[in-house]
Image (cartoon, grey):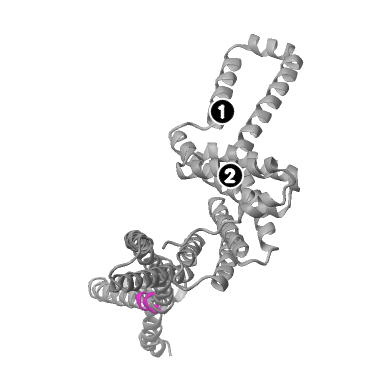
Amino acid sequence: MADQEPSASTSSMAGSGEGTDVGVEPMKLLGVGKRHMVMEDFAAAVNAFQDACRLLSAAHGEIADQCGEAYFCYGKALLELARMERGVLGNALQGVPDADDEDDEDNDEEETATAEDPKIESTANMDGTCAADTSEAEDDNVDSAEKDGESEEVDNLQLAWEMLELAKVIFKRQEAKEIQLCAAQAYLKLGEVGIESENYIQAIEDFNECLNIQQKHLGPHNRLLAETHYQLGLAYSFDGQHDSSLKHFKESFSVIEKRLSMLMERIEKAEEKGKSPAKDNDAVSEDKQEIEELKELLPEIKAKIEDAEESKDGKATKAFQETLVLTGKTDETPASSSSSVSNISHLVRKKSSLQRKPEDNERDNKDPKKAKQEESSVNGGCGDAAHNRNGVPEKMESEEITSPKKSDPEAQSTS
């Protein structure tokens, strides 16, 4: 048979009341609220559970043990209602411009109007005090209305957290196994509230507390363990911890496989007996129905496992590629830059030397007088150095070597 979600016994809740009406009416309201939850009429369920909580807290006290189940059901209904309202608001607000943009446009229009007509500005200054007072009053009313609207949106989720916290405190202080499992369910719903509010760290803590309690009191093939592992996988995935997410998704898949094998063995044993009572036949049909349900869950969990593996591998490969790029840049960039610079300088020197030497030879062959004038100017130390900067060192060296040879005959003639 399918595992039932643990719930606090309503007999203890009703038995401690002094009158029958005190215990009967809240029980009726709880039953009505649970039927609304099955029909997914969450608003009606919230109203029924709220009335039950009010009656029980008035009769027994706000933190009495009798209030635990009502608080838990109330918080769970508020959570579902908050999810539904968020989905509806998200769909309705698509394409709607922000109020700030509309205010900016109105302000721009007013500024342009006052700039074009100075009379408007003067009348506005005359009535400034009255307009300021009325505008402040209107702003206060608008702010209060906006705050009320925001509080209505936030209240369902916030109130769900408060009710589930009360239920957790009430359940956790009791030592009975059934009540401890109720505390685990309260932790589970608190974790779901954390996911809805994007507080993933707190959600992970609540889910882990739930898992610790369940592992103490439940078998390894219980479906509640699979649900908790699945929720933990989601929370870790949203928080970016893909290794832990993959681990818990695999654990959830393993629990369902164990559950399937256990159910198959139980059905085989019942069929081997042959003739069996009607109760056994009902149990076998329920087990077969649960097997079909579990088989439908497996593909979804497999998809989550694949997504977690892809996210993990993608993150690892991205980090590896980044390290390769960084190491490649540090190793290759200096060598390539130095080699390119040396090659360019080598080509420049080679090109200049090849271009300068033929010009010098032609000048020496064609105009020997100009060559002599250049020699004298070089000895003076001005003209050629300013005219041709690239060839100055080579000419100066050659001319300094040849000039003493030309001056020897002149020295001999003077002597």
Say which element carries label 1: helix
Say which element carries label 2: helix
Taking depth in this image into account, of 299 and 114 the one nearest to the observer is 299
Give the residue type that dot 2 points to.
Leu
Q: Name the side, left or right, on which 159 lies relative to 267.
A: right
Taking depth in this image into account, of 78 and 237 the one nearest to the observer is 78
Q: Is residue 384 visible?
A: no
- State the image coordinates of residue 197 (x, y, percent, origin top left): 57, 50
- State the image coordinates of residue 169 (x, y, percent, origin top left): 69, 58
Q: Name the side, left or right, on which 29 lies relative to 307.
A: right
Give the residue type that dot 1 points to.
Asp
Residue 191, located in which quarter of the rendered image? bottom right
As drawn, the label of residue 104 is: 1
Numbered range of the magenta stretch: 335-340
Q: Is residue 38 visible?
A: yes
Which residue is at 38% across, 89% downward?
408
Which residue is at 36% across, 64% downward?
280
Mark 1 / mark 2, whichever is N-terminal: 2
Which residue is at 76% across, 16% downward?
129
Q: Single out the mark in the foreground, 1 or 2.
A: 2
Q: Residues within 10 Å of mark 1 (few under 14, many from 20)?
A: few
Q: CA distance from mark 1 to mark 2?
A: 51 Å
Q: Which residue is mark 2?
A: 30
- State the image coordinates of residue 216 (x, y, percent, origin top left): 57, 73
Q: Main secondary structure of the magenta part?
A: helix
Quarter occupied by the N terminus: bottom left
As drawn, the label of residue 262 is: none
